[in-house]
Amino acid sequence: MSHELHPLVKLLLDGELRLSDLPPELKPEGERALRLLESIDHAPVALSPALDQRVMMAVRARATSRWRWLVQPRELRIHVRPWTLVPALAAAAALVFVVLRPAAPSTESVATVAAPESVTVRLVLHAPGAERVAVAGSFNQWNAAATPLLRSGTTEVWTATLTLPVGQHQYAFVVDGIRWMPDPSAPGVDDGFGRRNSVLAL
């Protein structure tokens, strides 16, 4: 059988299909493939144990011969001429002097930059149809009227610029004094009362 087998016939030979599962036009090809498969000698091939020993001996011999030069002891002779020792000793003494010399006291002052105690942030909310918007949070004792947002022109965007202490703050927007909503652009946490608060980490 010199031509390429149909994929379904290959599945038949793999045992994934039966001959009756093939379409009628592929059954003759399937039968020929099965006859060819049956004609193959399925007797197990037994290799001589001596073959394994010969192969392993050849592998060990090749590995040993390749790396033998690394482990073989060799004699190493170093000839030192007396007149070459003087410059080498002088260089070593100079190196020791440079390494062990105490550092000169520095007269430069080191400026330290203190971390800021507060950060200025800008909160923005798109609130179509809102008459007024405020922000209530852990930084103003959740007072819904303490921090109002300003409308940007005639648009539906409301903004507030706050200077807050460094740390983590929770907050929510209050629309028209009654509707509390988290900031859609910030991560949120459950407030424990069925609502979500936004989190601002500074």
Image: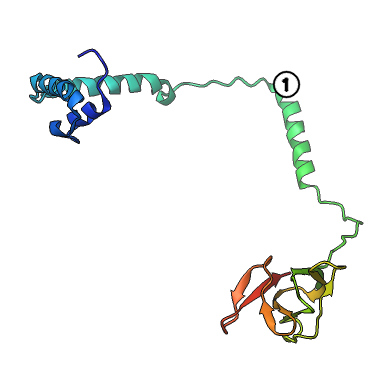
Is 93 or 109 nearer to us in this picture?
A: 109
Q: Position of residue 6 (x, y in %)?
A: 26, 24
Residue 193 visible somewhere in the drawing: yes
Q: Quadrant of the N terminus?
A: top left
Q: Is 24 left or right of 189, judged from the image as shown?
A: left
Q: Is 6 left or right of 29, judged from the image as shown?
A: right
Residue 47 visible somewhere in the drawing: no
Is 188 or 178 nearer to us in this picture?
A: 178
Residue at the right extreme? 107
Q: Is residue 110 above or below residue 23?
A: below
Q: Is 61 left or right of 32, judged from the image as shown?
A: right
Residue at the top extreme? 2
Q: Position of residue 54 (x, y in %)?
A: 20, 20
Q: Position of residue 74 (x, y in %)?
A: 45, 21
Residue occupying the point 20% across, 29% down: 23
Report helix, strand or loop for mark 1: helix
Query: Dot 1: few (<14), some (14–19), or many (≥20) neighbours within 10 Å?
Result: few
Residue holding disc 1: 83
Residue occupying the point 88% across, 55% down: 106
Q: Quadrant of the C terminus?
A: bottom right
Residue 161 placement: quadrant: bottom right
